[in-house]
Image (spheres, rainbow, N blue to C red):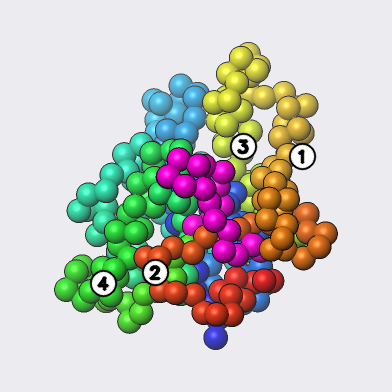
């Protein structure tokens, strides 16, 4: 039976950059995958035109998400909360419960609660706060409760405050590395505009754009994080693996089956 996977990130491009390779492998074996962004991406830029008309940037971010996901057959969803306005409150918790119930996943993926970005941290907390309530029929009774709790796992990171990431599973993604790179390239407004500006505004040209040389450099390094993950957890991977993604299983979801390959491909 096909697996149902729901990947929940704070922003458009979070899922693609973190689990794009594993998602492509799930799709290759016939599993259903949804990439969910909790926010609409309206504040992830610097050009004045997007401050004057945030809806213009929202449309761009949503279009980029579809362009990244559609070629692989991944579903796209968004809770449309403005960037920087994610809070763990009643309305957001109920929205998260309804969303996860709607997708009926066997596996939910998100970032760890000690991530550097406030939106990321609160999204993880919303997922964890929603977890038990997913099976409680009288909580959000308008959306039928799940019969069973999904497994919950976090994708890899390098943060140490609150404890280091523990790799319970590592997935080699060499066979789909180009799929992941293509997903990331689809987010033009992020990888080639906002992130370079946020890292070094002085390096932007007078037009507010990066140079052609800088763009090529960024494209060449988009999979560097996956390469570092493969080196970091090489003991869990087949010899010679160049690119990988890793996952830590959360205690708040159902325990994964003893055969991890049921949930995670190529392990």
Marks 1 and 3, how far apart at CA: 12 Å
The secondary element bearing badge 4 is classed as: loop
Q: Nearer the viewer, mark 4 or mark 1?
A: 1
Question: Looking at the image, is mark 1 or mark 3 earlier in the sequence?
Answer: 3
Marks 4 and 2, how far apart at CA: 19 Å
Marks 3 and 4, how far apart at CA: 36 Å
Q: Which residue is mark 3?
A: 191
Q: Is residue 168 magenta?
A: yes
Q: Is residue 266 left or right of residue 41?
A: right
Estimate how packed mark 3 is, as few (under 14), some (14 to 19) or many (20 or more) residues with alpha carbons within 10 Å. some
| Residue 218 in the image: above or below residue 197 | below
The secondary element bearing badge 2 is classed as: loop
Q: Which residue is outermost to the bottom? A: 1
Q: Which residue is mark 4?
A: 143
The answer, for residue 40, to whether it is visible in the render is no
Marks 4 and 1, how far apart at CA: 44 Å
Question: Looking at the image, is mark 4 or mark 2 earlier in the sequence?
Answer: 4
């Amino acid at each position: 039976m096909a697996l149902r996977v729901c990947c929940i990130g704070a922003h458009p491009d979070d899922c693609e950059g973190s689990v794009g390779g594993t998602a492509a492998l799930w799709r290759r074996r016939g599993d259903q995958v949804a990439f969910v962004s909790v926010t609409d991406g309206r504040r992830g830029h610097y050009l004045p035109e997007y401050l004057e008309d945030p809806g213009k940037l929202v449309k761009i971010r949503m279009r980029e998400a579809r362009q990244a996901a559609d070629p692989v057959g991944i579903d796209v969803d968004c809770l449309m909360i403005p960037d920087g306005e994610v809070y763990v409150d009643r309305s957001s918790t109920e929205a998260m419960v309804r969303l996860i119930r709607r997708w009926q996943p066997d596996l939910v993926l998100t970032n760890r609660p000690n991530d550097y970005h406030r939106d990321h941290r609160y999204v993880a907390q919303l997922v964890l706060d929603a977890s038990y309530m997913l099976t409680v029929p009288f909580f959000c009774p308008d959306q039928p409760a799940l019969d069973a709790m999904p497994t919950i796992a976090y994708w890899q990171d390098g943060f140490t405050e609150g404890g280091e990431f523990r790799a319970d599973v590592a997935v080699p993604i060499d066979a789909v590395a180009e799929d992941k790179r293509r997903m990331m390239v689809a987010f033009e407004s992020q990888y080639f505009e906002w992130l370079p500006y946020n890292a070094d505004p002085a390096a932007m040209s007078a037009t507010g754009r990066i140079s052609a040389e800088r763009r090529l450099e960024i494209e060449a390094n988009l999979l560097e994080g996956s390469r570092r993950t493969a080196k970091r957890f090489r003991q869990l991977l087949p010899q010679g693996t160049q690119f990988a993604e890793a996952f830590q299983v959360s205690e708040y979801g159902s325990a994964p089956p003893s055969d991890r390959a049921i949930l995670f491909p190529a392990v």
